[in-house]
Amino acid sequence: MATDPDDDELELIRRSGVVLRVGRLSLSSGTGSYRVKASMARVARALGIDRHEAQVTLTEITTTSHRGASFRTEVTEVRAIGINVDRLAALEQLAGRLDATGRTSVDDVTESLDRIAAKPPLYPLVLGAVWAAIACAAFSFLTGGGVTEIVGVFVGAFLGQALRRALVHRGVNPFAVTMLCALVACFGYLGFVSLLDATGITEVPHQAGYIAAVLFLVPGFPLVTGFLDLAKMDFSAGVARLTYAVMIVTSAALAVWALSLVVSLTPHPPAPPALDPGPLLALRFVASFVGVLGFALMFNSPWRIALAAAVIGMLANVPRIWFLGTGAPPQVAAALAALLVGLLTAVVAPRLDVPRITVYVPAVTIMVPGVLLYQSVFSISNGDTIDALAAGVEAALVVASLAIGLAIARMLTDRTWAYER
């Protein structure tokens, strides 16, 4: 026989709903499931909920809140998958403030969440496209591109990211968006270098660098957070995130493959320009800093977070490149670089009062082997199984090594990661 809820049960419903909203905002901003659970638990504790449990996947949250003899179970779905570092930082600061004050009211938390949810992106569409273009242009230099490739990549990535921002905000299917934006970015790059060739400005063809123009589509956040979820024994969320990331990469790579067939190109990086060791080292520092900065700002990071990530990424990426030059295995270089990123972030992030993920994911995104990922799918589509396996396995090992390095750093500096209880 159905009964009307009493006052205590109604209050639990209100409090549970606010906690679930915190989780929805966190999940839709791109953070890992462990961070979503931690944020909800802190807010639940501040609202006087005795016990809070949650199951979080890539797009769904199931929570149960206990208070006295009553409990409340709720389920929600988050269809929009994106990255919003500014929102993640704001939610972390809210949870930290509630921890410091102890108890708070539902109305106060709701008012704070309303402000966080209503805040527009820090950068307009055009400026967001500029950040992506800068990041890809820097990546192009680090993979051997010269001046022509760098400028061409800037043009292509700008057009692709601008289109992506416009379509994503209209709710278009993310895989269709990825394929379309990959085509636009490649056409933008090839159009630029073809124009230079036609006008006689350059005598050497530069079409080989077009793959760098689509590197803004590499899902760095889902790849890294997926492996970190697995490290936290959260297999449902980790597998879902990695599956989503693979589908995004595959969508972009299939579009690149189709274009490559039409224009008879292969996605191999260009031959690097000849530079003296001194200038080359200096330019690698600059490119690493600018590349990480561009990716961080593309993720809607405030400038203080973006600059911190850029400095940390620069200090880790240049030694990684040098280590690779000595013949070291790529996965070893990636793990050591990520370990350094994680240790530096453990010092910097608390001083900025932001989640570590907002700093270390942009810092390692520039180390994700996007070219290898695209080459693997391209080779599969062409029937070159051996080449596909070689590129795919190396890319997977490098990405896994990045996550392993970050996880080890987290275990060394965070007790909640080192121990399950």
Image (cartoon, grey):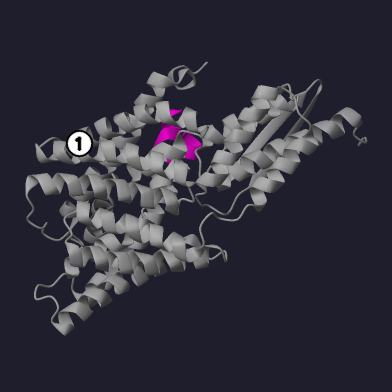
Tell whether 291 sits left or right of 237: left
Q: Position of residue 333 (x, y in %)?
A: 21, 35
What's the amino acid at mark 1? Pro
Q: Quadrant of the N terminus?
A: top right
Whether residue 227 is in magenta: the answer is yes
What residue would you read off at disc 1?
319
Picture quadrant of residue 347: top left
> How would you classify the magenta stretch by its main secondary structure?
helix
Q: Position of residue 67 (x, y in %)?
A: 78, 23
Segment tinted magenta in the rendering: 225-237
371 or 199, nearer to the observer: 199
Task: Say whether residue 252 is visible.
Answer: yes
Picture quadrant of residue 94: top right
Residue for point 16% across, 53% down: 387
Residue for point 24% across, 77% down: 262
Q: Residue furthest bottom?
A: 199
